[in-house]
Image (tube, grey):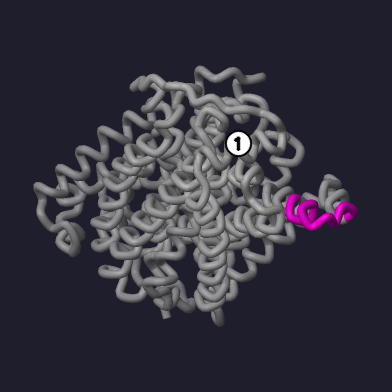
Amino acid sequence: MSNRGVTTLNRQLGIVGLAATGICSMIGASIYVVPFMIQRHVFGIGPFVLPAFLFAAVPAALAAISYAILASAMPRAGGSYIYASRSLSPYLGFVASFSQWFGLSIAIGVVSYVIIPFIRDITQALHWNELAAWLSVGWVRVTLSLLILWTFVLINIRGIKWYERTLIPLMMLMFALGAIVIVIGLLNNHQDFANSLFHKTGQAIQLQPAKFKWTTFLSGSALLFSSFIGFDSIAQAGGEAKNPGKLLPRAIGISILTVTGFYFVFTYAVYHTIPWNYVAQEALTTDVTAPGLLRVVMPASLSVFVISGAAIALFNDLPAMILSVSRLMFAWAEDGIFPKRIARIHPRHHTPHTAILASGLMASIGILGSHFAGDFFLGIDIMVTSMLVNYLLMCLCVINLPVKNPDIAKGITVYKSRLLQKIVAGAGSCLLLAFLLIQIIKDLSSPADAWYFHSTFVWLIVMSVASLIFYWKWKALHKQGIDTQKLFSTLPQE
C-alpha cells in the first residue's frame, strides 16, 4: 500500500514490452508518407533524404542518451516531468510536460481519426466498394475512430499484461508487413521501374542532377527528426518497469537503434526502386505514399498487405501513446500539481485508471477537432515543437542534476563519467536548439489562413495555460503547509 491509501503501480513491464513501447511510439504510418512527401515540403531535398535522416538521428541519439542517464537515476512514472522537476525546476518540469501531454493527446486523436481512411483503402483494394463508401461517411468515421480509441483506453486500464499482449503482436505484424515493402524495393531498381511505368502509362523518366544546399538539408533533417519522437514514452513507464535502473536505459537504446535501422532500410528500399525525381514530381501534384509509388512494380495481390502495414503502424501508436500521456498526468497528481484524484490506481489492475480515462477524453477532443476543423497536421506540429523543447530540457537536466540534486545524481548507473555527460548533453543542447529554431522559423514563415493555424502560437497559448495552472496549484501547496523544496528534492514513493 502507498501513502495514498490505494494500491501501487506494479513493476511488470519487461525489456520487450519497454522496447516495444518506444518502437511503437516512433514508427507509425508516417514512415509510409514522410520520406516521400518531404520532396514537396522541403523542395530540393532530392536524393539527400537518407543523409538528412541520419543527420537527424544525431541529436535524437544524444537526447536518448540523456534520457537513459536520467532514467537510471529516477525510474518513476512520469519520466520527463520527474527529470525536469528534480533537475531544473518544478515549473519547467510541469509546463514543458504539459505541452508535451497536450500535443500527444491531440496526436492520439489524429491517429485514431486517420486510421479509418487506411481501412477504407484496404476495402477498396479488396473491391468491397459499398463498405468503402460507408467508411467515407462523416459520422461513421468519427464513431469508428472513437470506438478504436476507447478500445485501447480500456486495454491500458486492464493492466500491463493486457498492454503487452496487445502491443508486442502489433509490433511484430507491423515489421512483417513493412518487410514486404523492403523486399519489393530491393528486388527492383530504377530501370525496372522506368520500364514498368512506360509499359503501363507510356511515361518516360529522365534522371536529373541535384544540387546540395545546407539550408535545404537542415530543413529536411528538422522535418525527419519527427521520426524519432516517441522513445521518451519508455521513460514515462518508469514506475512499471522491472529492474528499471538497467532496463529503462537498455530499452531506450534498443528502440532508437531498431527504429533508425528499420526506417533507413525501408526508405532506402523504396528509393532503390523509385527515382527521387519521379517522387518529387508526383509529390508536387498529389499526396504520395510508399504503397502508391510501388504500385507500378508491385503485384496487385500484394497491395492489400502493404496498405495493411500502414494501418497496423497506426494502430500500434495508440496503446503506447496512451500509456505515455496518462503517466504524465499521474506524476503531476502525485506531486500535487494536478488534482490528487487523478493519481488514483485501480485496486485490481494496478493502473492509473483515472488518468487514462482523462487522457482518453482529451484524445476524443482531438478526433472531433480533426473532423470539424479539417486540419490534421496542426496537432502534429504542436507535438513536434513540444518534444523538441522536452528533449532540449532533458539535455540541460543532465548538466544541472548534480548541482541541483546531488543525492539523486548519485543514482546514475549509465554513462557515469561527468565529462562524458557534459559532452553528450552539451552537444545535444546545441543541436536540439538549432532544430527547434528551424521548426519555429518554418512554422511562422509558412502561409496560413489565420494566426491560430501556426503551431508556435498555439503552443505558446498552451504554455500560458500550463503556467496559470502551475501557479494556482503552487500557491495551494504552500497554503497546505507543504515543504515544496523538500518535495521536489526527492523522488515520489513507489
Q: Considering only vertical position in the picture, is 423 above or below 301?
A: above
Q: Is residue 172 left or right of residue 304?
A: left
Please say whether residue 91 is one of the residues in the magenta stretch.
Answer: no
| Residue 355 visible in rendering | no
- Image coordinates of residue 450 in percent, x first then y, are 64, 20
Q: Name the residue rendered at 62%, 46% in the picture.
A: 297
Q: Nearer the viewer, residue 252 or 488?
A: 252
How many numbered marks appear?
A: 1
For the C terminus, the image quarter is bottom left
Say few, some or many: other residues with alpha carbon within 10 Å of mark 1 (under 14 / 14 to 19 / 20 or more): some
Question: What residue sits 57% from the left and 56% below the top?
Answer: 313
When asked about the image quadrant of residue 278, the answer is: top right
The spot of residue 44 in percent (x, y) is 46, 22
Range of magenta residues:
121-130
**Is residue 252 at all visible to an observer of this figure?**
yes
| Image quadrant where residue 359 sits | bottom right
Q: Is residue 32 above or below residue 126?
A: above
Q: Is residue 471 left or right of residue 362?
A: left
Q: Which residue is rendered at x = 58% and y = 64% of the image?
A: 354
Say which element carries label 1. helix
Could you say which is closer to the camera, residue 52 or residue 110?
A: 52
Q: Main secondary structure of the magenta part?
A: helix
Q: Where in the figure is residue 274, as x and y percent of width and height?
A: 54, 38
Q: Nearer the viewer, residue 214 or 50?
A: 50
**On the rendered structure, is 294 left or right of 49?**
right
- Single out the residue that lies furthest toward the right: 130
Tell whether 260 sits left or right of 175.
left
Q: Residue at x 51, y 56 (%)?
A: 183
Residue 227 position by quadrant: top left
Which residue bears the numbered disc 1?
377
Report x, y in % for residue 416: 13, 58
